[in-house]
Image (cartoon, rainbow, N blue to C red):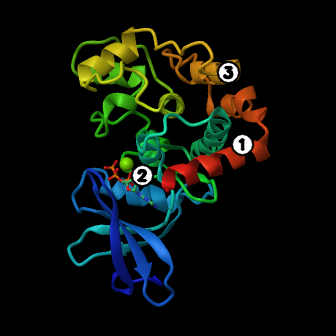
């Protein structure tokens, strides 16, 4: 390839996860900035992640310029740098939730990314604020294909969910329970519906400024999450906390029955998304990012 690991200086750590560490790096000759994600050899899903990032190329997905081998046998993904960081870090930076206009733009761009993935038969499986990255230009892109799957090859969910259960859909909980002998099997599930659920939780979290499916301060244990997601009514938004359009959008994403949940295609034409004032939404999102990046 055109890049070697030795061409880069490591400037800082952008994030750490299960799979490895993400560094901000500078290409010495051109001074161009990138994110370098090191995935440790033998980490479950390392090969799948490399496979998937090689398959995708969209303005709504964090671009991978190159996959570089390391001396220790780890893989290093040279990624487009998203200089606004993750929506998770922005929402945790305080200042409460995002304005609705900005959320319509987040939803529109994330859905465009999911539509692209759907067309390539990729299920992301880990849609959450930490895996949606933004830049100062106001772009939102899907990142982290650490537990993604290509449907034609697998067709069925992998047993272990390596991420947090906080963004896991009801049918995913059911699959896990039936694998352990309880829970009921109800025939095949639509694997793409789980990503729509994750987007619904994400939009609600960005609106409320905190994790939305459990009361503030409650620990996100597997049992508490399963109870809330599978059996309890979703939390009601206070009067005036959201427009009818946003309420309808979130309700369509958070249908517990995956067969009734809206598809990516349906959500792209939902009034909350399709009816937004595009210029005003983009501006609102850019401003929200800029405010929170300071
Ligand atoms: P896994 O979920 O498989 O354990 P991970 O969470 O370790 O993976 P990522 O989600 O890809 O890996 O990256 C972790 C964090 O690093 C992100 O939440 C984000 O804050 C930061 N990050 C990752 N990629 C980029 C990028 N291209 N630009 C800026 N920041 C990034
Ligand atoms: Mg991640």
- Tell me, yes or no, whether the two marked residues, 3 and 1, touch with CB atoms within 8 Å: no
Residue that label 3 marks: 243
In-image side of 199 versus 58 (left or right): left
Whichever of labels 3 and 1 marks the residue nearer the N terminus, that label is: 3
Q: Earlier in the sequence, mark 1 or mark 2?
A: 2
**Around disc 1, counting alpha carbons within 10 Å, would you say few (fewer than 14), some (14 to 19), or many (20 or more)?**
many
Residue 108, given in percent of the width and then of the height, sits at: 66, 40
* Residue at x 56% of width, y 58% of height: 135
Left or right of 160 on screen, residue 102? right
Q: CA–CA distance between discs 1 and 2?
A: 25 Å
Residue 281, numbered label: 1
Query: Is the CB–ligand 1 distance for label 2 below 8 Å?
Result: yes
Which circle marks residue 144 in the picture?
Answer: 2
Lower sequence index among marks 2 and 3: 2
Q: Answer left or right for 11 relative to 196.
A: left
Residues at marks 2 and 3, CA–CA distance in whole angstroms:
31 Å
Task: Work out how far the residue at label 3 is from the one at label 1, CA to CA, in angstroms.
Answer: 15 Å
Q: Is residue 263 visible?
A: yes
Residue 261 in view, yes or no = no
Residue 143's spot in the image, x, y percent? 47, 52
Q: Residues within 10 Å of mark 2 (few under 14, many from 20)?
A: many
Q: Residue at x 66, y 42 (%)?
A: 105
Position of residue 112 measured from the top left corner of the image (x, y, whole percent): 65, 44
């Amino acid at each position: 390839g055109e890049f070697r690991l030795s061409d880069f200086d490591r400037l800082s750590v952008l994030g750490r996860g299960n799979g490895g560490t993400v560094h901000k790096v500078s290409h010495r000759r051109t001074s161009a900035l990138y994110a370098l994600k090191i995935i440790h050899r033998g980490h479950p899903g390392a090969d799948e992640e490399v496979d998937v990032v090689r398959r995708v190329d969209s303005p709504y997905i964090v671009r991978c310029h190159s996959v570089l081998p390391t001396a220790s046998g780890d893989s290093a993904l040279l990624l487009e740098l998203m200089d606004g960081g993750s929506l998770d870090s922005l929402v945790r930076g305080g200042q409460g939730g995002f304005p609705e206009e900005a959320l319509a733009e987040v939803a529109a761009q994330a859905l465009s990314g999911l539509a692209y993935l759907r067309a390539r038969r990729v299920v992301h499986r880990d849609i959450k604020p930490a895996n949606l990255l933004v830049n100062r230009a106001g772009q939102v892109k899907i990142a982290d294909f650490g537990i993604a799957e290509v449907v034609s090859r697998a067709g069925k969910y992998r047993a272990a969910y390596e991420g947090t259960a906080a963004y896991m859909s009801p049918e995913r909980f059911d699959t896990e329970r039936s694998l352990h002998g309880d829970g009921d099997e109800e025939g095949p599930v639509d694997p793409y519906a789980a990503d729509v659920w994750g987007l619904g939780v994400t939009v609600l979290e960005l609106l409320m400024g905190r994790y939305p499916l459990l009361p503030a301060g409650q620990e996100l244990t597997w049992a508490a999450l399963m109870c809330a997601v599978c059996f309890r009514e979703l939390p009601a938004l206070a009067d005036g906390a959201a427009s009818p359009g946003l309420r309808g959008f979130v309700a369509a994403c958070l249908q517990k029955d995956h067969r009734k949940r809206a598809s990516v295609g349906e959500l792209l034409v939902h009034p909350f998304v399709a009816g937004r004032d595009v210029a005003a939404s983009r501006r609102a999102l850019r401003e929200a990012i800029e405010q929170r990046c300071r």
